[in-house]
Amino acid sequence: MSHTDLLEDCGGQRMRGECDADAHRTKLSRVVFFERHRRGILPFPMDARALHSLPLDQLTGAERLTLVFDLRAQQSKDPILNTLTTDAQPEVVRAAKLALGLDKSRHRDRATSRGNLAERLIDCHALLREKLRTVFRDVEAIL
Amino acid sequence: MPRRWREAHSHPRHYSRGQSELGKEAGLATQSVLPRLEKYTASLSWDKLDHVALPQGAFGAVENPGLIYVSIPWIVLVPPARPEAIRSLEAHEIGHQWFGNLVTQSTWTDVWLSEGFATWLSAKMMDEEQPADRKHINLVVQSREAVMTADGSATSHPVRREVRTRPELDTVYDRTPYQKGGAILLMLENWLGEDVFQSGLRKYLVAHAMGNATTDDLESVLPARAKPVMDGMLNTVGVPAVSAGCEEGKLTFTRKAAERPGNVPYRFAGRLRRAAYARRM
């Protein structure tokens, strides 16, 4: 897929956008999906019109999931979330239910909680730090 | 050297007294992950790659060059543990053989060059095992969403920060360099393109092999447009919020003024007759 870079100077801070080159050749549609591929760390709020114009069936699972996450971050209860509670991907279903308050479970809403390596490493480091502090306290008490 | 290693050790060795059966999954995981990591980066630089499963260890796993220590509960397959979790762990620790061992960050400030890369590489390797309709879901959940949920709290700090005191050193290995570091790499790969990104990383590994590197060194092997984006993301707490609208055929992107420095990369898809941008302050 080819892309054309577009630069917009925004208040002295340059912003970079990329749009599909092919898109220029066709008629304007209400459907504009921001942050395509949804792998940037950017929350992209969408207004209701844009939201309901989205062809959900043409979005990838990851795109649908981040869409739900962004709606949840906005505390939105948009009806599109109801549609996504029947999504093919379990992570999307779970996130949509959490966003709608339908899933009250205390379980972590991480698709791979057991396999979340980073969390396990961090927990382990925290445990180590705590143990070291105890040791230092004991040593200080002895001294 | 890698060829010699392969000839001598066609199968990675794992030692875990009395738990060899349970440890088999770790061996299989290494065989699954290592060739894919080598294909993405470069051949392994060490003569061997052993694992030792320890009953108890200070850390869950430590990625010594050619000899990875792993706590037993992390590496042996005790039901209901899943083989994927062990493969993910293996991908992380073996990923450090390049990012952390072959090239080591110069200072604590750049610990993300080790942990962020290992986190991202692990998720990337696991993602390769997913069917097409599940691509990037794990990455989104583990990195992007985790960061966007947690970053910006009172205790948040930038990915890169100078460490001057022992208490500060205690928090070097918190979530930020792992998850936000990984998420930034995910974003850069998507934005710059997978081939461009991979090519840059290979140059970085070659240029600094068996040595130290900084974030500047990494930025220097990527396209110039990456630097302002990386600096903004790595040196600032939180994530940028960009709102976009489509009104009367005109696209408007708005970022909260002076919210944070640096460029913001984004992509959009749509059917447009012409690209019309407007500035709204």
Image (spheres, rainbow, N blue to C red):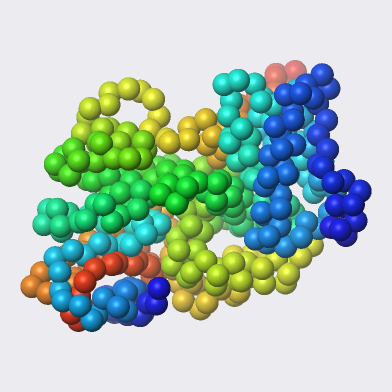
Please give the count of numbered marks on the rendered protein.
0
- Return the x and y of residue B197 as percentages of the image width and height: 55, 68
Judging depth in this view, the residue of A139 and B255 nearest the camera is B255
Direction from residue A41 to residue A23 in the image, left or right: left
Residue at image x 52%, y 66%? B194
Residue at image x 76%, y 23%? B21
Quadrant of the drawing holding the N terminus of chain B: bottom right
- Return the x and y of residue B6 as percentages of the image width and height: 85, 52
Quadrant of the drawing holding the C terminus of chain B: bottom left
Judging depth in this view, the residue of A25 and B109 nearest the camera is A25
Task: Say if B216 sits above or below A63 in the image.
Answer: below
Residue at image x 36%, y 40%? A89
Is residue B51 in view? yes
Direction from residue B12 to residue B146 in the image, left or right: left
Direction from residue B2 to residue B128 in the image, left or right: left
Task: Say if B29 sits above or below B112 in the image.
Answer: above
Is residue B111 in view? no
Residue at image x 43%, y 47%? B134
- Return the x and y of residue A36 as percentages of the image width and height: 33, 62
Direction from residue A10 to residue B113 in the image, left or right: right
- Return the x and y of residue A101 as percentages of the image width and height: 22, 29
Judging depth in this view, the residue of B24 and B120 nearest the camera is B24
